[in-house]
Amino acid sequence: MNSEKALREALEPCPLCGGDELSHGFVEGGGVHWGTAGCEACDLQVTKATEAEAIAAWNRRALAKPSPAPVEREGEDELTAMLSCIQREEGVTIFEHTAEEIGLVVMEHHAAILSQINRRNGS
């Protein structure tokens, strides 16, 4: 396998558009020279001191972000179930639980509930 073919096959798909219409090269002009690697489909291009550096930079990808920690749902399911109405008529909603029972659940899990509200609101 010649080095030109090896370099071409070394290029990963475009990180922007996913395309495989890729090119690389070494440009000289006016006393300046640089290596490039890029996508012909979307014109994304990387320029470095050498062609090998440009290809290495092109193929560099961000590490996948770790999965977020599971969200604490303490009290949420219980409170959601308690707030589910069992009947609605003429503007009146009837719940299976009393306001005192619902209030006790809110008080018991207030920190977790407040944290969830803040996450949803981006605070």
Image (cartoon, rainbow, N blue to C red):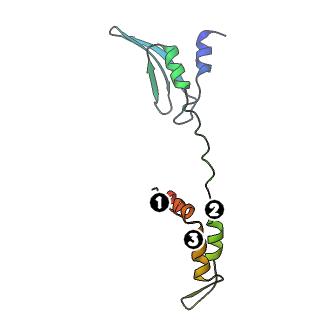
Mark number displayed over residue 19: none
- For the view shown, which residue lies furthest in the bottom direction? 90
Q: Nearer the viewer, mark 1 or mark 3?
A: 3
* Amino acid at pointer 1: Asn
Residue that mark 1 sits on: 121
Mark number displayed over residue 106: 3
Residue 71 relative to residue 42: left or right: right
CA distance separating discs 1 and 3: 19 Å
Q: Nearer the viewer, mark 2 or mark 1?
A: 2
CA distance separating discs 3 and 2: 11 Å
CA distance separating discs 2 and 1: 18 Å
Residue 97 horizontal/vertical position (percent): 64, 81
Q: Nearer the viewer, residue 111 or 116?
A: 111
Residue 123 horizontal/vertical position (percent): 45, 56
Asked if marks 1 and 3 touch (Cβ < 8 Å), the reply is no
* Amino acid at pointer 3: Val
Q: In which quarter of the image is the N terminus?
A: top right
Residue neighbourhood size for the residue with mark 3, other residues' Cα within 10 Å, grouped as few (<14), some (14–19), many (≥20): some
Asked if marks 3 and 2 touch (Cβ < 8 Å), the reply is no
- Residue at left offset 54%, top offset 20%: 56
Asked if marks 2 and 1 touch (Cβ < 8 Å), the reply is no
Q: What element carries label 1?
A: loop
- Residue at left offset 59%, top offset 68%: 108
Q: What element carries label 3?
A: helix
Residue 90 horizontal/vertical position (percent): 56, 92
Mark number displayed over residue 74: 2
* Relative vertical location of residue 85 with respect to residue 109 in this rendering, above or below: below
Q: Earlier in the sequence, mark 2 or mark 1?
A: 2
Q: Which of 75 and 37 is in front in this view?
A: 75
